[in-house]
Image (tube, rainbow, N blue to C red):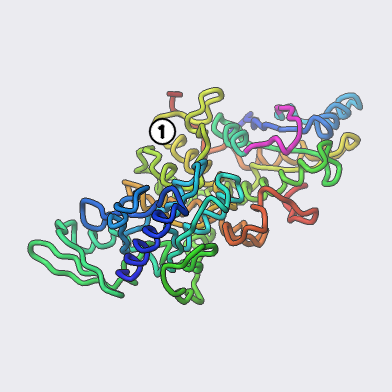
Amino acid sequence: MLAYRSKIRETARRLLTDHQVDAVIGFKKGTVPMMCQPVLITRPEDVDMLHWDSFCGVNLANYLPKRQGRIAVVAKGCDARNIVVHILENQIKRDQVFVMGIPCKGMVDRRKITRALKDQDILEVTEGADTIVAKGNSFDMPFNKADVLQDNCAICIHRNPVIYDELMGDPVPEQEGVDRYADVRAVESMGADERSKHFQDLVASCIRCYACRDACPLCYCPTCFVDESRPQWLGKSIDPTDTLTFHLLRAFHCAGRCTDCGACERACPMGIKVRRFTKKLEKDVLELYNYEAGMSLETRPPLDVYRPDDPGDFIA
Amino acid sequence: MKGWEPKIIAFLCNWCSYSAADLAGVSRLAYPSNIRVIRIPCTGRMSPKFILNAFRHGADGVWVSGCHPGECHYLEGNYYARRKFALLKNFLEHIGIEPGRLWFSWISSSEATKFVDMANMVNDKVKALGPAKHLIKTRARV
């Protein structure tokens, strides 16, 4: 992690000093433990602000659409895939972006640590190669990083960036034999009423803050469907049907584009497992159209193309 | 429920299925009056929002019908639609809409009998399922 940090700073300094880029998007240390915040810097003297640790889970591809000039961006495996999606969707041009690729072993879910510590105040967190130590007034608790990874990182099979201009470290081994869709299959084995209840319960605590939408790099529509009023697709309240409709449509808009970066779930203040929705679509896109989002600049997204022999048995 | 009849929203492509419905009428073929037709320019115009909105407003079934593959007036609209529908149907069934509420078909403008058969079939299946329970917005609109 420390090696990444110095390499990020060094690269950013070089790019800014040589005027190869106009800005660098990266992370700076947050004001509380286990939080890192995105930062955009334009001056070489600011590069020491740049930071890297296992809490840099925010997807920085979110800050790219429609940006002018040349930008360097720090990108983990999933972020790099989202940059590919942006390039495919004409949100940014390839030659505008300098991808500082991070081979990533997964980001740590801060909630898993606070939950394990029963919400005691954590004052400091130090990080080793595979361990994390959380310190407070009355405790000093070590964690295995592998045990507290974000859910999506634990089942990640594309840890190395798919596109990059420079890697910030040596590629890491990809995880083998991961069961990516265990939770989807668990729902698929339920009956219709049980599933309906499962998803109603899942979003019951949703407060409709739209943090999942705002954190998602795919959600860049000038006017989101939730804000449309003529016609109004769904109400503004936390009516259960409105809430569920929001989650359904949000997920459907990500069909064939979602890289399972986990930004939605990490942003949710209520801790709702919103990836349950997108995962099903991701699985279907893989099964029906053999497509994984953001893996290549050469293939178009699955809903942008068709084949005459696409599966159509469900149509009479 | 005695005397209950389902409400079924049918989104029909202007260039084929809508004409098929027309031909069915002209040919004096009978089909269930539970079908409410909405004319769309092409199945490629269909958005998942339309289908969700129909369910939210209390539709017991939704049926989308367009041109056979290769016969689209706009050449490829129905091909794109097919991909969207495949994902949407799986997704809605995944979250608890019963299989049998959402129907798709390809009906050309000469296939009045296929239209009538399909309308009868959709009506029977939706009727068997009973009134819709999920995704209906029951509280007042805010």
At a point 62% along the width and 30% down the height, the residue shown is B4
Q: Position of residue A81 (x, y in %)?
A: 53, 58
On screen, residue A151 versus residue A234, left or right, reads left
> A33 or A177, which is in the foreground?
A33
- Residue A104 visible to the viewer: yes
Segment colored magenta: B36-47
- Tell me the quarter of the image containing the N terminus of chain B: top right
Does the magenta-highlighted stretch encompass residue A138? no
User: In the displayed structure, would residue A97 be above or below residue A183?
Assistant: above
Please state the horizontal and vertical placement of residue A95, each as a whole percent of the image. Answer: 57, 53
Give the residue displayed 32% in from the left and 47% down from the top.
Answer: A270
How far across and how far down the image is residue B53, in percent? 57, 32
* SS category of the residue bearing label 1: loop
**Which amino acid type corresponds to the residue marked 1 in the rendered image?**
Asp
Quadrant in the picture for residue A200: top left
Residue B141 appears left or right of A304: left
**Residue highlighted by disc 1:** A239
Q: Position of residue B114 (x, y in %)?
A: 85, 40
Quadrant occupied by the C terminus of chain B: top left
- Residue A134 versus residue A284: which sits nearer the camera? A134
What residue is at 88 percent from the left and 37 percent from the top? B111
